[in-house]
Amino acid sequence: LNKSYDGATATASGFGLARDGGSIDGNLRHVNLPVITNAVCSQSFPGLIQASNVCTSGANGRSTCQGDSGGPLVVNSNNRRILIGVTSFGSARGCQVGAPAAFARVSSYISWINQRL
C-alpha cells in the first residue's frame, strides 16, 4: 500500500472538460499520465503538496481538467486496476498548460476507509 508509483503510467478518468474553454458534454474520458514525484510536483504548487498527494505530469498539455474532480487515478498491476488517487486539483492557468495535476493519495486514507466499511 505504501508504493509511490513514481514513474508509472496511470489512467485518470472523468466527465470534465476535454480542453480549456470547452464545455462539459457528459462524455466519460480518460487519459494516460506519468506519475511524478511529489518533489517535482511541489515546484508547480509550492506549499500545497503533502505526502497525502500523488501527482501526474501535465506534459504535452495532457491532464485532468475542470469537472474531473473526484474521479479515479488507476494503475494496472497483474491485470488488475489499482486505485491510487482521486482527482483533486490542477493549475489555475488551465488544463492544457503542461502543469502537473494533484490527486488525493488513496493509501493515505486506508485506515479511514476501513473504519467506515
Image (cartoon, helix red, strand yellow):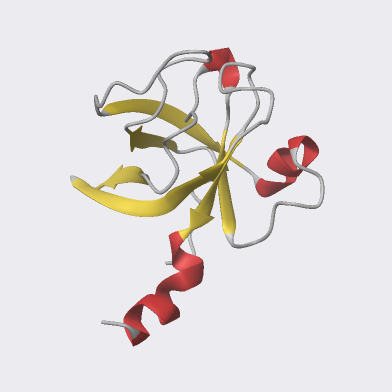
Q: Residue at x 34, y 35 (%)?
A: 14
Is 55 placed above or below 60 here?
A: below
Q: Quadrant of residue 29?
A: top left
Q: Horizontal and vertical percent for residue 13?
A: 33, 35
Q: Residue at x 69, y 40 (%)?
A: 41
Q: Quadrant of residue 40?
A: top right
Q: Is residue 78 visible?
A: no
Q: Nearer the viewer, residue 35 or 15?
A: 15
Q: Is residue 27 left or right of residue 75?
A: left
Q: How many marks?
A: 0
Q: Is residue 17 left or right of residue 78?
A: right
Residue farthest to the bottom, as pictured: 115
Q: Horizontal and vertical percent for residue 33?
A: 46, 29
Q: Is residue 19 left or right of residue 98?
A: left
Q: Residue at x 47, y 15 (%)?
A: 19
Q: Residue at x 36, y 23 (%)?
A: 24
Q: Nearer the viewer, residue 82 or 72?
A: 72
Q: Is residue 24 left or right of residue 61?
A: left
Residue farthest to the left, as pictured: 79
Q: Is residue 34 visible?
A: yes
- Please state, as top left, top right, bottom left or bottom right, where the N terminus lies in the image: bottom left
Q: Horizontal and vertical percent for residue 87?
A: 46, 45
Is 13 placed above or below 22 here?
A: below
Q: Horizontal and vertical percent for residue 30?
A: 32, 28
- Please state, as top left, top right, bottom left or bottom right, where the C terminus lies in the image: bottom left
Q: Nearer the viewer, residue 111 or 93?
A: 93
Is 81 placed above or below 26 here?
A: below
Is 26 placed above or below 23 here?
A: below
